[in-house]
Amino acid sequence: MECSHLDENVKITTLSIGHHEDNTWCCAVCKTPNSPWLCLACGAVNCGRYVSGHAKFHHEERQPVHSICMDCNNYSVYCSENQSKENRKSQRRHSTDSVDNGKKKRIKLDQSKKVKPKTSGLRNLGNTCFMNAVLQSLRGYQQQDAHEFMRYLLDRLHTELLTLLPYPNYTSPFIGAKGKSTIVTSIFGGLLQNEVTCLVCGMESKKHDPFLGRFCYTGIFDLSLDIPTKYTVKNLSSKSPEGSCDINDCLSSFVELEELEESELYTCSNCKKKQKSTKKFWIRRLPNVLCLHLKRFRWNTFYRVKVDTHVDFPLSGLDMTRYMLNNLHETRNSCGNHNDYDLAAVIVHHGSGAGSGHYTAYAVNEGQWYHFNDSSVTSCDEETVLKCKAYILFYVRRDFKLPDSLSIHNGV
């Protein structure tokens, strides 16, 4: 759809701002060549919101006239007023010969200084960044949620495999016993132990849950972690957060003992009535790929708000031992008793709203990290990844091993 702000905002006649000495685009403020955006009102070049956001600040200081900017790399045009993006490769209004020449002779960065991505991105089909971010992480109307899509995608793959694949097939490394496991659950499957203890008689109730959430029961392991309130920037008491939050703080909060609320009273099998009780989670079996979902959206009275707290996470060596039950069959024989994980991908939600914003992903390939922003793929360093406010983290077990039912038999 044509943006109504194009006519009044596109006014540049020369390009004199925002170049390196070697004529590559760079931010006029921080001088970075990453994600350069050209203001079509004044010709200033600033970095995008996934770098330092100087293009956004440029618009906010001069709005509404300076609302149209152009990506210097792929020539897409973005309007900050209505937050719409158009592809303007074949058409550009009120531009001079210098802009047209820039279109025909696109300046490329020095290939010796920049790592060339070994994969391509996915085109945004209209609010489909949530899907793109999940698919890019899992490969090596209203904004949708990436976490819900990921759970539905994996659950659907598992159920379809159970229905369509020829069972039994003992020569295949991807097909297990009928109705029990597929390659999906072998990679993402794990097991929780839910312990509920009656505070009146001490009766314990233990339940084993293949964990994904209330809608899926396939055994896909996905831990949804609360960010502890004391680390929340926007809490109800409006106090400052207490230091920095670490992913281990979120994991510890998940497995700590809690007393159930009056509205969640447990029906004790010994007392034969609802009693006050405590609840605690343990991990019985870890998956090969561990998905950690940080609950960044919470209900505040009548609407959902985003928890924008930064959570520190390791790129390698996440040790899950402290969160597991000890001396169990699943623990002793699960993948050689190694519980160390290395980060493979991160999904990030950009924006302040629960029903809006943008999803991108970071993923590593052969030691090099890449940033996937729909169809745009750029290399980045580890420091950039560590600074992002993660929404979903994908960790891969160092001692990755498929169960015996899905292992290759007879040397095949």
Image (tube, rainbow, N blue to C red):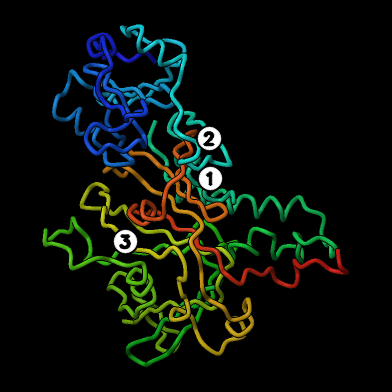
Three-letter code for the amino acid on which mark 2 is drawn:
Leu
For residue 86, what is the image quadrant? top left
In this orientation, which residue lies closer to the viewer: 43 or 58?
43
In this orientation, which residue lies closer to the viewer: 366 or 183?
366
In this orientation, which residue lies closer to the viewer: 263 or 136?
136
Q: How far apart, in angstroms, are the residues tagged by discs 3 and 2?
A: 27 Å
Asked if 288 appears above or below 162 in the picture, the reply is: below
From the viewer's perspective, tell me whether residue 140 is left or right of residue 176.
left
Quadrant of the frame with the N terminus: top left
What residue is rendered at 40% in x and 22% in y? 76
Three-letter code for the amino acid on which mark 3 is drawn:
Val
Residue 369: x and y in percent read 48, 50
For the residues bearing labels 1 and 2, Cβ distance under 8 angstroms: yes
Q: Which residue is mark 3?
A: 311
Quadrant of the frame with the C terminus: bottom right
For the residues bearing labels 3 and 1, Cβ distance under 8 angstroms: no
Q: Which residue occupies the extreme front position in the image?
A: 21
Three-letter code for the amino acid on which mark 1 is drawn:
Gln
Residue 231: x and y in percent read 22, 64
For residue 295, what is the image quadrant? bottom left
Q: Which residue is mark 2?
A: 122
Residue 170: x and y in percent read 84, 65
Q: Secondary structure at mark 2?
A: loop
Q: Crowding near pointer 2: few (<14 within 10 Å), some, many (20+)?
A: some
Q: Which residue is mark 1?
A: 136
